[in-house]
Amino acid sequence: MSQSDIDAAARETLRLIGPDPQNWVPDRHAVDHNVIVIGGGQSGSAFAFALRRAGIGKVTVVDAAGDAASSGPWLSSARMHKLRTSKSLPGPELGLPGLSFQAWYEARHGAAAYGAIDRISRLDWAAYLDWYRKTLGIKVRYRTKLLRIEPVQDHLRLHLDVAGEVRTETARKIILASGFPSNGGPAVPDVLSRNLPKIFTPIR
């Protein structure tokens, strides 16, 4: 396969499923987004693609990371060299083989190379996810952090930190796909840490 044909399977898959359905959700006054997805990693990107294929428009994806390279744990905080899950598990391809990790990997390294790996390298997974977003045209607004969600009548108001500037946007629905960072960091209640030596006091 020539370099120019490396993504032929993906292109053919997208041709066969046809254009995205038209947005069937009526606009609502004072609502910016039908859905806002918090987190542009593997789950957030898959949700964005699924919503688009379902004919839901006005979907936006935001991520607190500075850029794609620093989004998610794969190129930053992940300590394992390989994913802990089996390479045969379904991924964000939504049942479309031409968009799968296997198709992406075999196009670059061959079927024999894919057969030889037991589990997926985290670096390969990060590269695949970057390809997935670019191939499907999933745009992520980076440097955008969710601060607070406020119910307002029949929709939601989101307070966002956009590159250091506080803004508000509105949405009908929110999908929280922020992964491990949303679990928070280490913390010790004040009642326990009050009398601890400073060397044991958590950094705040």
Image (tube, helix red, strand yellow):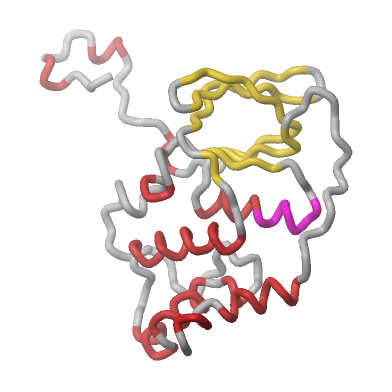
Point out the residue furthest to the front here. 4
Q: Quadrant of residue 17?
A: bottom right
| Image side of residue 76 versus residue 58, left or right | left
| Image side of residue 188 versus residue 138, left or right | left
Residue at image position (55%, 52%) is 43
Residue at image position (75%, 32%) is 172
Where is residue 136? Give x, y as percent: 61, 61
Q: Quadrant of the C terminus?
A: top left
Indicate whether 198 appears above or below 11: above
Residue at image position (38%, 83%) is 109
Where is residue 34? Give x, y as percent: 75, 37
The chief SS type of the magenta part is helix
Between residue 93 and residue 18, name the one nearer to us: 18
| Image side of residue 166 versus residue 152, left or right | left
Where is residue 59? Give x, y as percent: 69, 43
Indicate whether 59 appears above or below 54: above
User: What span is colored magenta in the figure?
Assistant: 49-55
| 54 is within the stretch colored magenta | yes
Between residue 26 and residue 184, name the one nearer to us: 26
Where is residue 118? Give x, y as percent: 36, 78
Residue at image position (75%, 58%) is 53
* Total residue callouts: 0
Indicate whether 91 appears above or below 140: below
